[in-house]
Image (tube, rainbow, N blue to C red):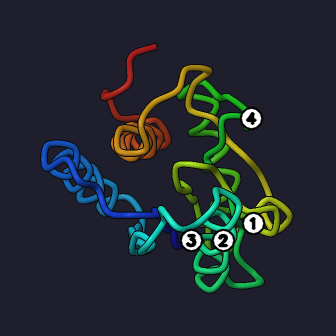
Amino acid sequence: MKTELILVGKTNNKHFQAGIDDYVGRIGHYMPFSVTVIPELKNTKAMTEEQQKEREGELIMKLVQPSDTLVLLDEHGKELRSVEFAAWMEKKQQMARRLVFCIGGPYGFAPAVYDRADEKLSLSKMTFSHQMVRLIFTEAVYRACTIMKGEPYHHE
């Protein structure tokens, strides 16, 4: 199963980007994993939040195939412990052709993206910057990979 992470806007913090790159490289030892960055919109000051979400949503939807399983990282999504996330990923590997995770822009997702989504996951009840979420999520995927392989990275 191929797994992809779609991000709206590039990661600006070089330290976060270095960590993300490290985990993406590690994940690649376990499964095909790629990151696609949708460029930040131009002239957002002239747009309402809704217009910005709609435009980002159009760009996201261009990348999602009808057969993909689309999972949004969203504050209202289901929270899973690491071992639960690993079990969830293992199940998805058996069922999905391509698993696509998406971290939206600063205002969330357009209604069309929510309508298309198969599931929503939340990393925490707390709010993190979109920059941090990218690092936290790639570490979570790496952790899930090591749990699925029975490796000693995760301590329960």
- Give the label, 1 or 3, closer to the camera: 1
Which residue has dot 2 on it? Answer: 57
Residue appearing at x 49%, y 68% in the figure = 4
Q: Mark 1: give few (<14), some (14-19) or many (20+) Cα within 10 Å.
A: many
Q: Where is residue 38, by image quadrant?
A: bottom left
Residue 153 image offset from top left, x and y in percent:
31, 29
Of pointers 2 and 4, the one earlier in the residue sequence: 2
Q: Is residue 71 above or below residue 135?
A: below
- Give the label, 4 or 3, closer to the camera: 4
Instruction: Determine the secondary structure under disc 4.
Output: strand
Residue appearing at x 41%, y 36% in the figure = 129
- Give the label, 2 or 3, closer to the camera: 2
| Mark 1 → mark 3, Cα distance in angstroms | 22 Å
| Mark 2 → mark 3, Cα distance in angstroms | 24 Å
Residue appearing at x 77%, y 84% in the figure = 66
Of pointers 2 and 3, the one earlier in the residue sequence: 3
| Mark 4 → mark 3, Cα distance in angstroms | 26 Å
Which residue has dot 1 on it? Answer: 113
Which residue reaches farthest top?
156
Of pointers 4 and 3, the one earlier in the residue sequence: 3
- Say whether marks 1 and 2 touch (CB < 8 Å): yes
Amino acid type for the residue under numbered disc 3: Met
Asked whether, in this view, residue 129 is left or right of residue 106, the answer is left
Amino acid type for the residue under numbered disc 4: His
Which label was assigned to residue 76? 4
Residue 1 image offset from top left, x and y in percent:
56, 71
